[in-house]
Amino acid sequence: MRIDIITIHPQLLESPFQHSILKRAIAKGIVEVNLINLRDYSTFKQKQVDDYAFGGGAGMVMMIEPIANCIEQLKSERTYDEIIYTTPDGETLNQQQCNRFSTLKNIIILCGHYKGIDERIREHFITKEISIGDYVLSGGELAAAVLCDGIIRLIPGVLNDETSALTDSFQDNLLAPPVYTRPADYNGWKVPEILLSGHLSNIDKWRHEKSVERTKQRRPDIYSKFKNGTD
């Protein structure tokens, strides 16, 4: 997979890809992540990428020309499956979307800033708009990092145990069950006996029951989807 991230602050995105799972995925050649500085596509001497909004109002708007120049250059070199814009008014990111994105080959992620981007970019270039929650950040870089982490960890070969991702929270509209490790008894706080039994089918049944119970208690909105068999 190739992920091209368009940003005015590429330094903000360097660290997430230099550590842990994402670093290993890149080192293995499973995924290629390119940080593209939008200012390199500005035609202004000072590399300006923002301007005042038509009609007035507070805040600046990311200009159409540098973004269009950048995306058109990238599209001339390869075909992209999705061109994603990170924005608070996009679709809220969920596990099902991450699952789908992880099967794609080439993705562009455009990081928003200021009061947003010129609407014509959204109308003519963007294929998917994604939000990571109902709040506003200083820019789209952190959202892009979250999105990339959610996608990359699902690609075959990234995790040491590929079945691990299949039991994550939100897969099948259930939260993950409780987990325990050694010691089995700490200050009198004991691990449930069923997990020490070695009876795998009973353990699987217990875990499923706990997932359902936890989801019903903590996320009734997701539980209703599980109960109705919907995504």
Image (cartoon, helix red, strand yellow):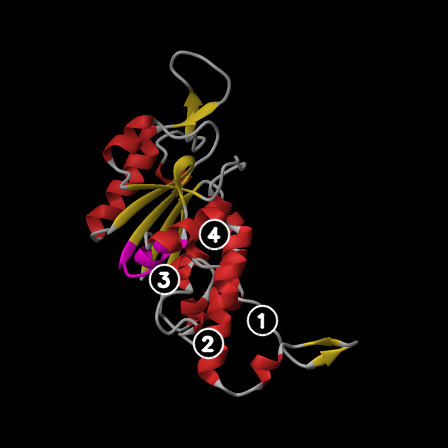
Q: Residue under circle 4?
A: 145
Give how far across and how far down residue 5 sits, in percent.
39, 49
* Mark 3 vs 2, N-terminal side: 3
Mark closer to the observer (4, 2):
2
Give how far across and how far down residue 161 sits, in percent.
44, 77
Q: Which mark is residue 204?
A: 2
Looking at the picture, which amino acid does disc 2 mark?
Asp
Q: Residue under circle 1?
A: 179
* Mark 2 vs 1, N-terminal side: 1
Let me know if residue 85 is in the magenta part: no
Q: Residue under circle 3?
A: 32
Secondary structure under the numbered disc 2 in the rendered image: helix
Looking at the picture, which amino acid does disc 4 mark?
Ala
Crowding near the residue tagged with mark 1, few <14, some 14–19, many ≥20 C-alpha atoms within 10 Å? few
Task: Tell me the quadrant of the picture where the N terminus can be found.
Answer: bottom left
Q: Are marks 4 and 3 in contact (CB under 8 Å)?
A: no
Crowding near the residue tagged with mark 2, few <14, some 14–19, many ≥20 C-alpha atoms within 10 Å? few
* Mark 4 vs 3, N-terminal side: 3
Q: Which mark is residue 170?
A: none
